[in-house]
Image: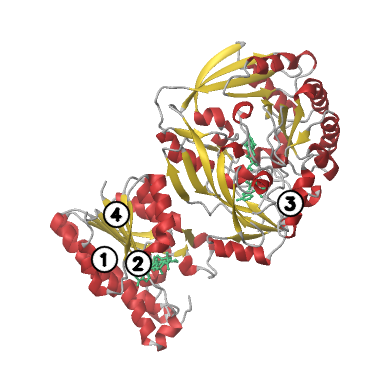
């Protein structure tokens, strides 16, 4: 069966997705900065699923490498899932532009650079699906993470435009907005249990939504309602809060 | 955190450590004492419980599968069920499997588990080609029957007290079907049960369910189930729908009347002296896995399993005496399993020996522990022993008498200073 390309493959959510897609019969390209660190994982997955699992090196910040990276895939993927992200440190990013820059480029510029290339290929072939993992943080800016949040907001908008563009070619674009997820990114943070998803729950939500060709999902589902409340708080009140 | 084992007894509070890298595990062993590895918590008692627990289940990659040599190499946290999911469809099965597939490979080695074919294939360690073990100082050693044999014999059956098993290469057997031809033999009393075991001693798999509440003439009446893999080429292996017990049931539901009714029904439902069925792997080997959390039927207080084995020559009189004690007490439940074992192996603390073993569950209630102590006396009188994987209460004296190689085990623990790092509630209680 055709390959699914997962970008940012070392993240816990990406690994859960890899298991899910291999289990359901897909071969995989797993792209990460240090693919050698995924060797044990990929070997395990290969034995369990008997699918072809290939490891590839990719730095989302190395924009000029993206074209060559995509061209080097001898069989083009039937779907691409971008899991890459960088939370960064908000306070540092306020005063040190290099940190802000890195947050913006990892969550937005870099992914745009790569997905543009993918979109051209899919549009020409009239097949494929694209999944982008954005965040609820992009729904409304808050003082605790608005640099990350605004980069994710830009990414959400990008995905919405891409969906619109690729619709005629029959290509589905899914935007995923996770709430809290227990992963390396949030390790050590004090997350509210009931609202926090495990990586494999998010992966399951994504897989099912992608199979059903949905457009936008929240994970866990209740975040849709939480965010709808948050989005409806009048700005004059919202600006005084610290949530 | 509070982890418990399958019996939900005892209840403890522990510190739980996780590792995904060898270096992390090494640091944990370096810094803490009273540590014990924890697999999937399917041991019934306190062998995997301690103040400090190292969780091994997340350390669960397949490392290699070699079809030509019929071996699979996995990290110790891989579940037997994972191995079956991957390899039954390819025509492979475990040489030795216990009555649940929801245990880790590490747990299978540490308890040197056995299955319905012990009389032919022996314990799990027979199928272990080699494993690696992390010693207290962080050194990693390969152990097999040829290499570091002392550590091999101590670790197989060593209840996690020699170090952390990291990965193991297991040899498998080929099968040509996921179905088993099962023959059920209904016996009227203990004598007939023993005769049936002897008559079917060449069957690949055999085990009996015994009605431990039947008295008088019916004492020891059983259903002996024997089986052989079929040869029909059907290898698909899917998960069945599972029932679930969502919470602890009130424990009064299980009493001598309800159990007696269940037992009569279970025994009575088979009409013929000999009947034949075609069953699949899960039905034959893992009937209890079909009900998730079945341990919750024993209620909040939990339960304990009492499993002992007696040498063959004293098995008949010994079992009779044991069954009389149990039926008189009116305790004991519907899960009572009798089996004829093959010869003992050389491992220091492995449970099996040639003879008959009986395992039965008791809910934790007044009088149970006093009954166990009475049973202990009979076990010792007949030269038997208790299975540590099921135990939460045995005394040091009773344990030691059953395991003559304990001194070798203790000496080895001392030599490698394992006792300074690894202790379980069970090892502290029994002075292992
Ligand atoms: C329904 C049911 C049926 C069963 N049937 C049988 C049967 O037929 N035959 C039989 O022999 N047993 C049987 N058992 C018992 C079970 O097979 C054993 O208790 C087994 O050891 C449980 O494995 P686990 O992975 O759950 O380990 P745990 O219960 O977590 O631990 C068991 C022991 O193994 C040690 N251990 C675990 N992992 C490691 C490791 N990586 N390195 C070192 N030590 C480790 C622990 O310290 C502990 O001493 C049954 C249990 C159940 C619940
Ligand atoms: N966890 C949450 O609560 C949460 C909530 C909402 C949204 N999300 C989003 O979910 C996605 C997955 O996050 P996660 O929680 O699983 O955290 P994570 O483990 O930190 O995942 C981020 C991934 O992005 C990769 N990455 C970062 N910079 C990269 C670069 N320059 N080039 C290539 N890859 C790079 C990381 O690779 P390395 O492993 O090499 O560092 C890592 O695999 C992210 O997009 C995140 O923003 C997470």
Q: Mark 4 highlights which residue?
A: A4
Which label lies toward us, 1 or 3? 3
Residue A160 x, y percent position in the rendering: 25, 65
Q: Mark 2 highlights which residue?
A: A134
Circle on res. A159: 1
Residue A55 x, y percent position in the rendering: 34, 59
Same chain shared by disc 1 and disc 3: no
Ligand 1 lies in quarter: top right
Chain where mark 1 sits: A
Q: Vertically, is B308 above or below B19? A: above
Q: Secondary structure beneath disc 4?
A: strand
Q: Mark 3 highlights which residue?
A: B412
Same chain shared by disc 4 and disc 3: no
Q: Secondary structure beneath disc 3?
A: helix
Residue A223 x, y percent position in the rendering: 42, 62
**On the picture, is A36 further left or further right than B187?**
left
Crowding at dot 1, Cα within 10 Å, few <14 / some 14-19 / many 20+, comes out as: many
Per the model, the C-alpha gap separating discs 4 and 3 is: 52 Å
Q: Vertically, is B408 above or below B285? A: below
| Residue A161 visible somewhere in the drawing | no
Per the model, the C-alpha gap separating discs 3 and 2 is: 56 Å
Chain where mark 4 sits: A
Q: Secondary structure beneath disc 2?
A: loop
Circle on res. B256: none
């Amino acid at each position: 069966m055709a390959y699914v390309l997962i970008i940012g493959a070392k993240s816990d959510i990406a690994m859960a997705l890899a298991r899910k897609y291999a289990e359901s019969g897909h071969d995989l390209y797993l792209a990460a900065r240090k693919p050698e660190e995924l060797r044990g994982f990929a070997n395990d997955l290969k034995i369990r699923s008997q699918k072809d699992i290939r490891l590839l090196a990719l730095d989302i910040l190395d924009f000029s490498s993206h074209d060559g990276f995509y061209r080097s895939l001898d069989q083009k993927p039937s779907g691409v899932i971008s899991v890459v992200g960088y939370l960064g440190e908000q306070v540092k990013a306020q005063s040190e532009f290099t940190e802000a820059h890195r947050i913006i480029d990892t969550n937005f510029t870099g992914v745009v650079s790569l997905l543009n290339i993918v979109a051209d290929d899919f549009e020409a072939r009239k097949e494929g699906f694209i999944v982008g993992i954005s965040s609820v943080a992009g729904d409304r800016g808050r003082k605790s993470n608005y640099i990350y949040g605004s980069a994710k907001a830009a990414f959400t908008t990008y995905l919405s435009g891409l969906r619109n563009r690729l619709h005629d070619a029959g290509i589905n674009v899914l935007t995923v907005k996770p709430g809290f997820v227990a992963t390396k990114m949030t390790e050590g943070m004090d997350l509210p249990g009931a609202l926090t998803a495990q990586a494999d729950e998010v992966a399951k939500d994504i897989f099912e939504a992608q199979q059903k060709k949905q457009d936008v999902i929240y994970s866990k589902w209740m975040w849709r309602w939480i965010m709808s409340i948050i989005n409806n708080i009048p700005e004059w009140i919202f600006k005084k809060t610290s949530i | 955190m509070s982890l418990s084992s399958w019996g939900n007894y005892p209840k403890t509070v522990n510190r739980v450590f996780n590792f995904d890298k060898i270096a992390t595990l090494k640091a944990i062993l370096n810094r803490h004492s009273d540590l014990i590895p924890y697999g999937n918590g399917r041991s019934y008692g306190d062998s995997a419980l301690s103040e400090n627990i190292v969780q091994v289940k997340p350390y669960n990659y397949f490392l290699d599968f070699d079809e030509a040599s019929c071996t699979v190499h996995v990290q110790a946290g891989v579940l037997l069920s994972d191995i079956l999911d991957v390899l039954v469809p390819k025509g492979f099965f475990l040489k030795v499997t216990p009555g649940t597939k929801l245990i880790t490979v590490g747990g299978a080695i540490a308890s040197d588990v056995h299955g319905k074919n012990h009389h032919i294939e022996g314990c799990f360690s027979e199928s272990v080609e080699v494993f690696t073990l992390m010693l207290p100082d962080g050194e990693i050693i390969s152990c097999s029957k040829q290499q570091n044999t002392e550590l091999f014999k101590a670790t197989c059956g060593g209840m996690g007290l020699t170090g952390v098993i990291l990965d193991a290469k297991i040899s498998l057997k080929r099968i040509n079907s996921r179905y088993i031809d099962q023959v059920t033999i209904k016996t009227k009393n203990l004598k007939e049960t023993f005769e049936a075991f002897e008559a079917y001693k060449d069957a690949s798999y055999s085990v009996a369910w015994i009605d431990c509440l039947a008295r008088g003439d019916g004492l020891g009446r059983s259903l002996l189930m024997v089986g052989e893999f079929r040869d029909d080429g059907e290898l698909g292996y899917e998960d069945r729908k599972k029932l679930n017990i969502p919470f602890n049931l009130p424990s009064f539901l299980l009493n001598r009347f309800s159990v007696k009714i269940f037992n009569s029904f279970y025994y009575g439902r088979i009409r013929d002296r000999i009947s034949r069925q075609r069953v699949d792997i899960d039905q034959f080997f893992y009937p209890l896995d079909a009900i998730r959390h079945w341990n919750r039927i024993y209620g909040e207080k939990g339960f304990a399993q009492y499993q002992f084995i007696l040498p063959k020559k004293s098995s008949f009189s010994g079992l009779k005496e044991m069954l009389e004690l149990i039926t008189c007490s009116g305790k004991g439940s519907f899960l009572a399993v009798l089996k004829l074992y093959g010869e003992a192996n050389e491992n220091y603390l492995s449970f099996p020996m040639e003879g008959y073993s009986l395992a039965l569950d008791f809910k934790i209630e007044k009088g149970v522990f006093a009954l166990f102590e009475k049973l202990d006396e009979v076990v010792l009188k007949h030269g038997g022993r208790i299975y540590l994987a099921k135990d939460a209460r045995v005394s040091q004296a009773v344990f030691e008498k059953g395991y003559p190689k304990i001194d070798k085990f203790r000496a080895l623990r001392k030599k490698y200073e394992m006792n300074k790092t690894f202790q379980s509630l069970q090892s502290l209680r029994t002075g292992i």
